[in-house]
Amino acid sequence: MANERKAIGLLLKNNPGALSRISGLFCRRNFNIDSITSSATTDPAVTRVTITIHDDETVLRQLMLQTARLEDVIEVFFLEPEHTLQRELLLVKLSATVNNRSELREIAAIYKAKIIDLTPESMVFELTGAPQKIDAFLAMLEGYTILEMCRTGITAMERGPVRVHNRKPAETLRPEPEILE
Amino acid sequence: MLLTGSEIFAEVLVEQGVTTMFGYPGGAVLNLYDALYHYQDKITHIMTAHEQGAAHAADGYARATGKTGVVLATSGPGATNLVTGIATAYMDSIPMVAFTGNVGTSLIGKDSFQEVYIAGITMPITKHNFVVRHVSELAATMREAFRIAQAGRKGPVLVDIPKDVTAAKWEFTPAQPVPETTVISFNEENVVQAAQWINEAQRPLVFLGGGVRSGKGCYALKAMIHKANIPATHTLMAAGVLGYEEPLNLGLLGMHGSYTTNKAMDEADVVLAVGTRFSDRVALNTDKFARKAKIIQIDIDPSEIGKNVDVDLSITGDAAIILEAMLPHIQAAKHEEWLRDIDQWKSIDYHPVNHNDRLMPHQIIGEICAQAGPDAVYVTDVGQHQMWAAQYLRHVKSRGFITSGGLGTMGFGYGAALGAQAALGRETPVIMLTGDGSFHMNLNEACTAVSYDLPVITVIFNNQVLGMVRQWQTLFYGKRYSSTDPHRKTDYVQLAKGFGLKGYHCENLAQFQEAFAQALAEKKPAWIECVIDKDEKVLPMIPAGGTVEDLMMS
């Protein structure tokens, strides 16, 4: 568990520059993150961000605490791996001719990757899945010529009807100051 | 009430209790200054020589009073000139609201004249910042800025206001000043546990940081150390929280702390750290810091818990509230053996030697304290003189020692001293201690002292060199004095005269006694140049990364 990939979820106020505050903080505090994704939520005033990091517990804890200090951060929560669904989208463009097209189709079929573009010289695959699955698919493509590739980065959500992070209120990370009588 | 953005700006300042502010006008803030013209009876605006001085002045004002400091600057260079001042306040958790003008919203992003993205520039050095995009948001944003600056762990907030927002009209509804807030909750079990550890300790030590001062935690703290006879040490930021007349106060810890304090930290079995972030100037070697002790940490900011040094028990919250809750659980004790050990270390500690033929830093500072008295406020710049001040000033007031701790900003002193003097009034002596290096950075603020008749007495420790850097070059760089001996020919007496204030030149203690007495009596801004030896060192010293075993006394 020491240096496995860990995912953290954030709820941010949808203010201009909020994402830049988050990424600036990581840079300034020397946190080396693997991926960051950001998207809308059901509430237009709130943005959801998923961060993944390969580092130990101490670094993870500091990252969460430092992030919680930002005014635009509503909530920071650790996504327990055993309760979390992680997904990533891959687009990969390969050099493919009539000679190897069927091999590639075979690999794609095993991984349930879709062919979304085809020309006489190239193919584009789309694959959605857990990051490990994407890694494994790419490993299978190592012998071929990848012309272009992009991955969206990880987006994550807890399983089941309950929002797990609701049981760990942000106050433990950022105590709310009150008026002292 | 239908008001312009500029009128709303002035109204909210008044509503938030701002009576003094610092700043410098310019194109983008013309409307704001026009409004301030009509509010002169309610808000005193002090115009400095440079925006950096204004930012340090707002900071000094806040440090001297505990109130939020306010600074205003124009767009572009006006805004960027605030940056060092804002960063200084951020590192020391000082409540400040900085307002900057910006070009009109239609010109933003076009590289317009005097346009800069100050919100982006100041993101890492503010608690939070805002760009006001519409006049309808102005009042609420300003109130939110004051709320954030003085909530929990305090700090600077910046509000950037485009010019068209200052001209546009909107309905204004008056409101109450936003109250200062703090973290009220804390873990009671941990408080009981901490008290138990302290009660069981044979060699307890209290270790104070700047958070104690901003948390007003002094009363319960003093009661606690007296009840259980616990010695205390402090960081630079907590100098003055316990007076020097307090026998349990061992003084400054860390790189230029005494042998006694550093030895006590090394030998302690329980350390109660309050409002300190264990900076690298105190915990020089984080693995060996308080190596025999169980460390209890109290801090209002959870991210400070265990950030630099691993701790055994932590309590997140307001130091004053937590210490008050802890006090009844603390048992009376004597700790005679421990205090005897400490007295033993004191007897072999470093003691500076007096001289009558030349000026010695500790003698200058001793004379300043003797004459200026316990009500004076002392402000420093950064360098050797700052460390001497922390070591030898017998300052007694909790807010009586104003210094740039975390950022170590040379040039901080003059602006900060002017801010403190403006806050405290002419009757409180404000003494600025500086070195010739720091002083040259922002001595232009002398004109501000004269214009507003702020009687700051500046004592310049002139060793002709950048003393602190030179000291490191002497000790660690084979005496290769690269760029620390600029051979400046500044005539401080003549220069003071040019600015319209009185300058003195002193080469021995008798001359200094006379000059300082005269400057104090005149209640006018003055400079006193004290010639000291260029090889005078700050001692003792523990090199970076070292422990008390590496402490140098000569």
Image: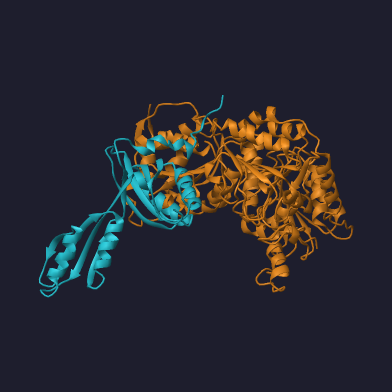
Relative to residue B81, is residue B477 depicted above or below?
below
Relative to residue A104, is residue A57 depicted above or below?
above
Please indicate whether residue B222 sits to the left or right of residue B124 in the image.
Answer: right
Please indicate whether residue A117 sits to the left or right of residue B532 in the image.
Answer: left
Percent of width and height locating residue B398: 70, 38
Q: Nearer the viewer, residue A87 or B45?
A: A87
Residue at 66% from the left image edge and 72% from the top image edge = B482
Relative to residue B485, is residue B366 depicted above or below?
above
Q: Is residue B253 visible?
A: yes
Relative to residue B66, is residue A153 depicted above or below?
below
Percent of width and height locating residue B28: 42, 48
Q: How many marks?
A: 0
Percent of width and height locating residue B157: 49, 43
Percent of width and height locating residue B399: 68, 39
Q: How is the image coloured?
A: by chain
Q: Chain B is which colour?
A: orange
Chain letter, cyan in picture? A
Q: Is residue B521 visible?
A: no
Quadrant of the image containing the C terminus of chain A: top right
Residue, far right: B356
Residue at 34% from the left image edge and 37% from the top image edge = A163
The part of the image, by quadrant, that contains residue B508 is: bottom right
Please indicate whether residue B36 sits to the left or right of residue B524 in the image.
Answer: left
Residue, far top: A181
